[in-house]
Structure formats: structure tokens, C-alpha cells
Amino acid sequence: MGQWQLQEAKARLSELVRASTEEGPQEITVRGRAAVVVISKAEYERLRNKKPSFVEFMRQSPLVGIELDIRRDRSPARKIAL
């Protein structure tokens, strides 16, 4: 991730925008501390997209409709001498 001081980012805004679209997120610092991150519109839209709920995710599984045998094995795990 590229790092820019605020003064430098203001003076070279077009270069900052180009770097965020071609190289990825660019961090802007104010007084030596990270303040903001500039990202491309495509990255913003990717992050903003709604993710399905867990139930919706499971319903989209290719295993939907397959019957499972989920009976519990009642045999003892091991013999214990008391």
C-alpha cells in the first residue's frame, strides 16, 4: 500500500488517483499518523456489495436436497473397568 503525506497528496492528486486505481489502496497520513485510505471505485463497489446471510448461503449449496444419515452411534467408545 502506498503512503502519502497530506501535503503531497494535495499537490499530486491526479497521481494519487492513478495509483489507487492501478496499484491498489493508498494511505494518506496527517502529522505522521494514518488518517484515510483512498481506494478505486471498483474496489469500493466490491466491498460495498451485500453478502448473503448464512441461511441464504447454505440454500445456495450444491448439496441442497441430499439426504444425510445422521443417526447417532450408541455403542460405547471404550470399555472402562470400574
Image (cartoon, rainbow, N blue to C red):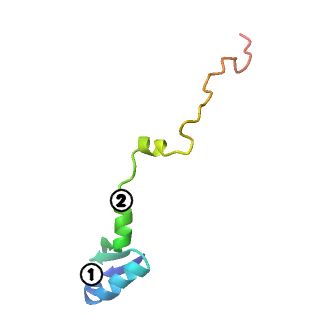
* Amino acid bearing label 1: Leu
| Crowd tier of the residue under label 1, counting other residues whose Cα lies within 10 Å: few below 14, some 14–19, many 20 or above | some
In front of the other: 59 or 35: 59
Residue 75 figure quarter: top right
Q: Are marks 2 and 1 in contact (CB under 8 Å)?
A: no
Q: x and y percent of residue 50 in the render?
A: 35, 55
Please identify the quadrant where the C terminus is shown.
Answer: top right
Q: x and y percent of residue 53 in the render?
A: 39, 45
Tag 1 residue: 6
| Crowd tier of the residue under label 2, counting other residues whose Cα lies within 10 Å: few below 14, some 14–19, many 20 or above | few
Taking 70 as reference, is 34 above or below it? below
Which label sits in the foreground, 2 or 1? 2
Residue for point 28% across, 86% down: 13
**Please, what secondary structure does the residue beneath circle 2 have?**
loop
Residue 49 figure quarter: bottom left
Q: CA distance from mark 2 to mark 1?
A: 29 Å
Taking 55 as reference, is 76 above or below it? above
Residue 29 figure quarter: bottom left
**Please, what secondary structure does the residue beneath circle 1 have?**
helix
Indicate left or right for 81 with 61 as reference.
right
Residue for point 38% across, 69% down: 43
Q: x and y percent of residue 1 in the render?
A: 42, 75
Residue for point 57% across, 41% down: 63
| Residue 7 visible to the viewer | yes
In front of the other: 30 or 24: 24
In front of the other: 56 or 26: 56
Mark found first going from the N terminus, 2 or 1: 1
Task: List the single residue furthest toward the front.
Answer: 65
Taking 27 as reference, is 64 above or below it? above
| Residue 32 visible to the viewer | no
Tag 2 residue: 49
